[in-house]
Image (cartoon, rainbow, N blue to C red):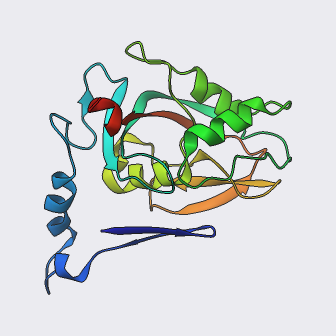
Amino acid sequence: MQLHISNSTIHLSVLPSAMLEGETLRSLEPLATAAYIGDTPQPGEYWNGQGGRFICTLPALHGLPARHLIVGGREAEGLTFGPNVEVPGAGSHADGASNTTALLAHPESHPAAKWAAEYSADGHTDFHLPSRLDLLMAYICAPQLFKKSGWYWSSTQYSRFNAFVQDFEHGNSAWDCKGTELRVRAVRWIRLDALNA
């Protein structure tokens, strides 16, 4: 599987050699499993001591290290992204941690980012509002962990008026007005280079 992000679009494509005529998407499972390291659980399973459920292992991309993606077990409802302002540093499609930091540093309140950053589980306090990529990978790897009705905020800003949202019923990624009240889940990363240190 290849991942490419350009402008505001995330492209996922399967390498032709990975699919044979007549095969279903289940044939991708060995490719995904091969990326898991050590004793990581299967997507959607709780990872003891890591603050939530394992989603997937993301490769090094856009200057970010390879990392395991974990989603917290609780969620908030009825939170807005924030006011209609352009927040410098909150436009990454892959780096939810830096987006969240930028949103929290802004003088105006950003409730979704604040809730995610204050989330803690299993003694871990390094949660953040997921990026657009984080939520897309959650939909691809473990959609059963999310409610099917409604939308979830990402930390990826689209403009001064909109930010990206993710649907877990059909997998749609779109943008919504920052003042809309939606759901929020917190995520954290386990950097693979930290595991090997």
- Residue 23 quadrant: bottom left
Query: Which residue shows up at 42% across the image and 45% down it?
Result: 65
Marker count (numbered) = 0
Query: Which residue shows up at 25% across the image and 22% down it?
Result: 48
Query: Which residue shows up at 70% across the image and 55% down it?
Result: 176
Relative image position of residue 91 (x, y in whole percent): 68, 53
Q: Is residue 44 left or right of residue 162?
A: left
Relative image position of residue 151 (x, y in whole percent): 57, 49
The answer to whether residue 49 is above or below residue 111 is above
Query: Looking at the rendering, in which quadrant would you find the N terminus?
Result: bottom left
Query: Looking at the rendering, in which quadrant would you find the C terminus?
Result: top left
Query: Which residue shows up at 82% across the image and 54% down it?
Result: 161
Residue extending farthest to the front is 197
Relative image position of residue 80 (x, y in whole percent): 72, 38
Q: Which of 71/99 is in front? A: 99
Q: Which of 65/158 is in front? A: 65
The answer to whether residue 157 is above or below residue 45 is below
Q: Is residue 117 left or right of residue 25?
A: right
Q: Which of 146/100 is in front? A: 100
The answer to whether residue 159 is above or below residue 180 is below
Q: Is residue 103 left or right of residue 174?
A: right
Relative image position of residue 63 (x, y in whole percent): 50, 52
